Amino acid sequence: MIPKDFLSIKDFAPLEIRYLLALARQIKANPSAYSESLKGKTLALIFEKPSLRTRVSFDVGIHQLGGFSLYLSPAEINLGKRESVYDVAKNLERMVQGIMIRTFAHGIVEDMAVHAAIPIINGLTDYSHPCQAMADYLTMWEIKGKVAGLKVAFIGDGNNVAHSLMFAGAQLGADVWVATPPGYEPKADAVEWARERGRETGGTCTLTHDPVQAASGADVIYTDVWASMGQEAEAEARRQIFLPYQVNAKLFALAKRDATFLHCLPAHRGDEVTDDVIDSPRSAVFQEAENRLHAGEKGTVAEQLANARRTSAEMVGLIRAGYRLVITHGNGPQVGAALLRSERAASQVPGHPLDVCDASTQGEIGYLLQQSLVNELSRAGLHVPVVTVLTQCVVSADDPAMQHPSKPIGPFYSRADAEERRRLFGWQIVEDAARGYRRIVPSPDPIEIVELEVIRDLVEDGVLVIACGGGGIPVIRSNGVLQGVEAVIDKDRASALLAASLGVDLFAISTDTDFVYLDYKKPAQRPLTYVTAAELEGYAKAGHFPPGNMGPKVESVLRFLRQGGKEAVITSYEYLTRAVAGLAGTHILAETRTLGPSTQAEVQVEGR
């Protein structure tokens, strides 16, 4: 992160904006890990304009990160009259470590940044409201599962909030529409910047005077007050002009069925928005947006299908871009559920061995992905056949892992129940993370993919292939005969083997984070964007990638590159299309080179 100040979303690169949002999600998910990130730091809060939410959020936020806040009202400062910007900056930089300023003219925060040697945060100006827009796009990401490609309709006055929504949307690849009365459009320079940046990211910025056009098919509808602070004298005149731009139930019904309503608050109910919209279940204004991707999921078929649909939409973006795909996936939770069902039903039906559970969950997840992909391709007007290949992976009976099981599977047991299963079934049992006892099985290296030539032929015939699910079904080959074994193959290793064996141009791993990070979840955390295999291997040896987290993915990427691969990328699923285009994620290159066009990719998605 090069800029020290946060004055405008324009001041950052798209990757940096995504990094900030990803960091916010991590802090939200695990606040205790960041509780001392700002220990001993003090943030001065300058409020030339009062605010409920800005005051509380900054005050509470700095304290939750281990720091302190110092509230300064107009009575203490009165910028430009009692105190000059220069004097305030020079005095405060000696006693605090940062300044958040909420004021009128944007030039004030720019002057403050010039004169102060400490970071300046723009809490609001007449031109820009960056923190508000960042919070809004974080909410969109949590609710919708992505930002790129969303239609975000701002209806009302083309003010500071509209500017920042345009800026952030352009950085993140959203399609932002702004509907205003004639003469109330956003500033021309703001529109031009958003359109220019959108040409890099795939985002768009469309102006219209027709609120119906903006609202139609929108994923998000956003509005703000018609007369902002300082415009009170114009309130009645503006009300007459803006009345056709009211977000009411009739206008909101034009948006998508799952559209979300947002407002930066305070709201003037009955003016820019009606109660039946702002208080509706589809309004995020007074609701806590949850992470609907994975947190708190129970593993139902409905949840799995929803995840498959979101992932499929991103796959279609890659196909539209000209890629031929082979998709792999994980199956850890599904295998655990299959083993539990098998065990609990053992008194009524014969149980299934682990390799059969591997096979059945390959079919289960493959079916959900295959159906979702067919539907998404049909909606996009693309005619691409999709098939799931039940895939076996050969392992060696002499692999040391076969004699030293290490992979926990299935449910947790009490110590007594675990010992009983050890006695009855010959299981090997370990205590897992102090949460109970679990069965452990071997996790051997895959050495051959049995159905490789079938997969290759299908890809060459233009078929979208789902294969090697959950790492493949582990089998051993003896005298030409295949036999399943009670083991689990790491999905990252199997995916890397398949990618290398097919000779794909690009190996992409979709996971929970947008980047590979150094010092992950530590105050010094920083993302990797472009690295060589040698650099990444050096970071791995330095201990940056834990075995239970990013470690297997990094190891698999390095395996792929050692076996002749040229490029790999690791990112979250909603940024796959942009990552493959070089606009997001962590890119690992076999060696330093200029990126060229690719046409064939293997994509591994997380199985949930």
Image (cartoon, rainbow, N blue to C red):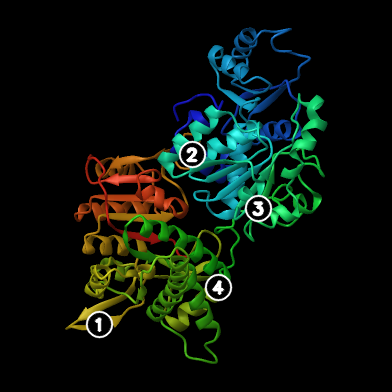
* Residue at image mark 4: 301
Q: Horizontally, is 316 left or right of 109 in the view?
A: left
Q: Horizontally, is 80 left or right of 574 in the view?
A: right
Considering depth in this image, is 579 or 62 the residue closer to the camera? 579
Measuring from the top left, give residue 50's x and y in whole percent: 76, 26
* Residue at image mark 2: 171
Which callout, 1 or 4, points at the residue further toward the start of the chain? 4
Which callout, 2 or 4, points at the residue further toward the start of the chain? 2
Give the distance between the C-alpha atoms of the residues marked 4 and 3, in whole angstroms: 24 Å
Q: Nearer the viewer, mark 1 or mark 4?
A: 4
Which callout, 3 or 2, points at the residue further toward the start of the chain? 2
Check disc 4 and report its element: helix, strand or loop.
helix
Check disc 3 and report its element: helix, strand or loop.
strand
Kindly identify the amino acid type of the residue bearing the numbered disc 4: Val
Which callout, 3 or 1, points at the residue further toward the start of the chain? 3
Residue at 76%, 17% (x, y): give it: 74
Measuring from the top left, give residue 394's x and y in whole percent: 25, 73
Give the distance between the C-alpha atoms of the residues marked 3 and 1, in whole angstroms: 53 Å
Q: Nearer the viewer, mark 2 or mark 4?
A: 2
The answer to whether one can see residue 567 in this image is yes
The answer to whether one can see residue 29 in this image is no
Which mark is drawn over residue 260? Answer: 3
Kindly identify the amino acid type of the residue bearing the numbered disc 1: Leu
Which callout, 4 or 3, points at the residue further toward the start of the chain? 3
Residue lying farthest to the bottom in this orientation: 348
Residue lying farthest to the left in this orientation: 479
Image position of 500 with respect to 112: above or below: below
Kindly identify the amino acid type of the residue bearing the numbered disc 3: Thr
Image position of 547 with respect to 85: above or below: below
Q: Nearer the viewer, mark 2 or mark 1?
A: 2
* Residue at image mark 1: 482
